Image (cartoon, rainbow, N blue to C red):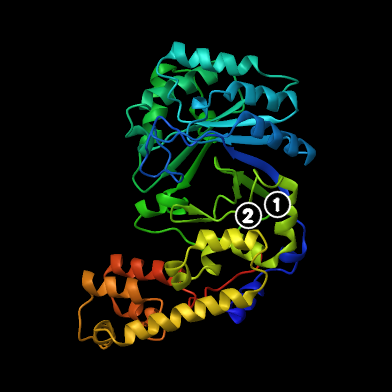
Amino acid sequence: MRKLIEKEIKHYPLDYFTNSFRIAYLSLEITNKCTNACRHCTNYCSPRQKKFLPITLVKKLIDQAVQQKHDFINIWGGEPFLHPDLYLILKYCLDNGLTPCVNTNAFWAYSLEAAEKTISQLKRLGKGGKTVRLALSCDRFHQEQKATPLINIVNALAVLEREKLEGYRIHSVESRGDNTLAKVFGDLRKHNPNISLEKVRQRTTILPLEKAAGRAKILTEQGADPYARFTLVNSEIIFCVSVTGEVFFYETFIGNEIMPLGNVYKQNITEILKNMNRQKLLKLLHFQPLKFFFYPFRKYVDIQKITQELSAGKIRNFFFLRNLASDLLQKRQKQFDFSQKLQLARRIYTGQCEIDPAALKTIECYGDLSDLFPLHELKRKITNTRLKQKIQNLLMTTYAYEPRYVQGTS
């Protein structure tokens, strides 16, 4: 395990670990309650959820952001407009010189009049040349929900353009063949023939589904690339704060769990940042979680608990993790050796057995034993595109996988 970690570390420039990163801005999940229960929701938000960040804590976080000399803060959920104190939070941001951006599904824009009412309220909050920005979520998953039909986005965009509010964005998660945004732009043109669709398109950010986090990864056949590198600009990072107070990076989801750096109920943002900057292990862990928590390790242990202990300083060296991983693999090896799966594995690799769903399940269950399962060799042998991709996904999350790195690329 130690050799593995040292091997991973050498692929990064030295300043990756020696530089002190600063926070570009905070991103606050102020509630996990939502009008929708979208299939791709990273945070599993829904109308059944009931958690809210209290305004007292949000104000403390805003104060800490001001101390860190931020000029921007992101507000998300859930659906932020369901938070009872949203307007007070936005006013507090603007009063303290921060530009807030609210991520919303626009459930409130069920008519032009309703959209105008909400946007006018936000416009009135503006202060000192700063106004509230909106990030409208628009994709096929949102349109599957009764609370957010496509017309809501069209209504919101029509009013935003009419009021000439510059700061809005459209965020979309798309897979191949999606035409949701095309419908929005078409309906918007029908609504207002004079509107500049090119201008609206320039404000649109599209995230391919296969690059999304958490549960969204499950919905794509391609699978997300866990080796995607961060592009660090001036050593700036984004701290996300969950509705339970945990601080994390957006990309550090393992399934439906996050791997926290700390908790704002117990520490302030500055303390959490200092702790992260002190530990090489935390930097490697949180910037490349799937590399560090290789396939067999995260399959058998509570990754979130280990991360919390690591962030709290209870795990201070590589040896604990190395020994834990070694014990797990030895135990797994013994279970495997005395099972019929070993015979099936041999038949697969000698070509005596077709790769059917049962055989693929064997690979998925026991693929962590790389000595017995030469996955690279298997990938070369098969022609089935779907199975090839599944094996590739498994390879990308197995510690034996050694990708080729190009320094300075993302």
Q: Give yes or no for contact between labels 2 and 1 (Cβ–Cβ under 8 Å).
A: yes
* Residue found at x 59% / y 58%: 308
* Residue found at x 54% / y 40%: 243
Of the 4 image quadrants, the one containing the C terminus is bottom right
Residue 163 in sight here: no
Q: CA distance from mark 2 to mark 1?
A: 7 Å
Residue 86 placed where, x, y %?
Answer: 58, 25
Secondary structure under tag 1 reads: helix
Residue 278 falls left or right of residue 365? right
Q: Amino acid at mark 1?
A: Ile
Report which residue position mark 1 lands on. 272
Residue 157 placed where, x, y %?
Answer: 48, 23
Mark 1 surroundings within 10 Å by alpha-carbon count, few (fewer than 14), some (14 through 19), many (20 or more): some
Residue 47 falls left or right of residue 241? left
Residue 324 in sight here: yes
Q: Which mark is residue 261?
A: 2
**Considering only vertical position in the picture, is 399 above or below 229?**
below
Depth check, front residue: 123 or 193? 123
**Quadrant of the image occupied by residue 255:** bottom left
